[in-house]
Image: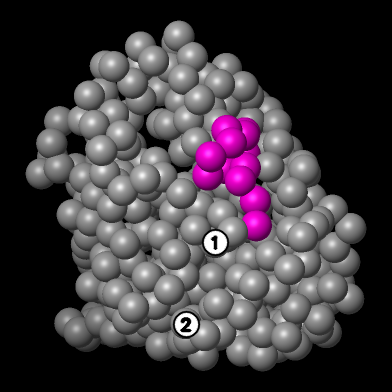
């Protein structure tokens, strides 16, 4: 299989599986415990059907929207995800450049592998920084200050990682950051020489947001779960989140909201948006899917805050269903990570091209000229 043969997220997944060593692929692909929530995130959309209208003159479609003050050319943006240069040596630069080509927002993780400053210099599309609150308060404040100086547009506080999820695939493969060779992993690395060459001889793998404060993850191998368990502040509460929002002083998102009660608290602390998300099923297995929770959260808070549906997106129709329920936009990680692993920037651009084409085509088939015309009248639940 080659890039030209990839026409969907599922195709990119197959190509990524061929090109990545087993521990790296399963880190992207895996989730917590029995991985039921990860599967349900996508399957939830199957319980909802679209009801199209016809003869509406939908020859020209406008996909643009505004989310937390950011003007986007399409209602789908790229969630912040960690460790991208493990998947392809171009890492976040490839993803950011692809987002720029499609006029949508790009998210950089606290565990990103390209620096805040380099992204700011090279990527001109709207930029979101995803913040993990560390026990080291100096590190947390340093990341916010660097984002201020680099003119990032949005800060997203991740709140669903009090402890690391039980990602059993990582336990089986021995996945750590940076990769720690074992007999099993060495065989897999040897069977993927292109990946091994790029990892060993391209720019050194680092976590530039963190390395001035902690060595874990850059030079000391550590599992992601152990990083969350030992480095992140498990005492964080709503008062802390409100203080961070005020210190940032620009559009602030809470990422990881799954209940109406928490959505209302996000409104109360002055957040501009919430990402309804269960971390791609990688934390609490057995939790609801974002799409299943979307309607009640929108009904409770959607007139006060921008609601984003994050997770499980694989098709343009998934985006249209979420927008019809009242989401202002959708976001996702795996939908572009597979493509990044498959072919770098070219892969991410093709993945976005496929999803953009689906959105335009499906909007026309729905009889809608712009996303404001989507509504619950277009939906039926089984």
Q: Quadrant of residue 351?
A: bottom left
- Lower sequence index among marks 2 and 1: 2
Q: Is residue 55 above or below residue 354?
A: below
Q: Give the extent of the magenta segment.
A: 213-224
Question: Which circle marks residue 209 in the picture?
Answer: 1
Horizontal and vertical percent for residue 372? 44, 86
The answer to whether 335 is drawn above or below residue 139 in the figure is above
Instruction: For label 2, count other residues whose C-alpha is less than 10 Å away and answer few (under 14), some (14-19) or many (20+).
Output: some
Quadrant (top left, top right, bottom left, bottom right) of the N terminus:
top left
Q: Is residue 289 above or below residue 141?
A: above
Determine whether, in the image, residue 195 is placed left or right of residue 331: left
Say which residue label 2 marks.
150
Q: Where residue 355 sits in the image (x, y, percent)?
A: 29, 60
x and y, in percent, of residue 232 in the image = 75, 52
Tell me if residue 99 is in the magenta stretch: no
The residue shown at (35%, 25%) is: 21
For the residue pair 307 and 145, the one nearer the viewer reads as 145
| Residue situated furthest front in the rendering | 212
Q: Quadrant of residue 222?
A: top right
Mark 2 in CB contact with mark 1 (< 8 angstroms): no
Q: Is residue 159 above or below residue 65?
A: above
Look at the numbered disc 2 and give the secondary structure of its residue.
loop
CA–CA distance in space, label 2 to label 1: 13 Å
For the point 65% across and 57% down, which residue is it? 213
- In the image, 176: left or right of 83? right
Let me know if residue 35 appears in the view.
no
Residue 253, how many percent across, how many down? 64, 75
């Amino acid at each position: 299989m080659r890039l030209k043969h990839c026409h969907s997220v599922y195709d990119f997944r197959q190509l990524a599986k061929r090109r990545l060593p087993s521990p790296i692929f399963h880190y992207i692909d895996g989730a917590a415990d029995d991985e039921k929530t990860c599967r349900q995130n996508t399957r939830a959309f199957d319980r909802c059907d679209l009801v199209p209208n016809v003869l509406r003159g939908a020859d020209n479609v406008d996909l643009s929207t505004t989310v937390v003050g950011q003007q986007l050319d399409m209602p789908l943006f790229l969630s912040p995800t960690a460790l991208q240069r493990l998947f392809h040596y171009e890492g976040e630069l490839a993803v950011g450049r692809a987002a720029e080509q499609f006029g949508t927002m790009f998210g950089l993780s606290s565990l990103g592998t390209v620096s805040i400053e380099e992204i700011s210099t090279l990527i001109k599309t709207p930029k979101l920084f995803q913040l993990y609150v560390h026990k080291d308060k100096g590190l947390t404040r340093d990341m916010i200050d660097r984002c201020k100086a680099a003119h990032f547009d949005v800060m997203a506080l991740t709140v669903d990682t009090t402890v690391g999820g039980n990602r059993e695939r990582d336990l089986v493969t021995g996945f750590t950051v940076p990769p720690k060779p074992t007999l099993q992993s060495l065989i897999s690395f040897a069977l993927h020489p292109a990946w091994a060459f790029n990892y060993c001889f391209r720019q050194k793998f680092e976590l530039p947001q963190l390395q001035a404060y902690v060595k874990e993850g850059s030079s000391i191998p550590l599992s992601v779960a152990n990083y969350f368990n030992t480095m992140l502040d498990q005492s964080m509460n709503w008062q802390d989140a409100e203080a961070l929002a005020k210190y940032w002083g620009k559009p602030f998102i809470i990422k990881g909201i799954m209940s109406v009660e928490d959505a209302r608290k996000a409104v109360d602390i002055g957040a501009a948006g919430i990402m309804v998300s269960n971390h791609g099923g990688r934390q609490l297995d057995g939790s609801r899917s974002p799409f299943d929770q979307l309607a009640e959260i929108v009904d409770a808070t959607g007139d006060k805050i921008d609601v984003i549906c994050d997770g499980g997106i694989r098709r343009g129709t998934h985006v249209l269903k979420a927008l019809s329920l009242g989401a202002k936009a959708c976001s996702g990680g795996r939908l572009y990570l597979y493509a990044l692993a498959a072919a770098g920037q070219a892969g991410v651009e093709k993945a976005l091209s496929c999803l953009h084409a689906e959105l335009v085509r499906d909007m026309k088939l729905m009889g809608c000229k712009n996303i404001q015309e989507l509504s619950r009248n277009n939906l039926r639940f089984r």
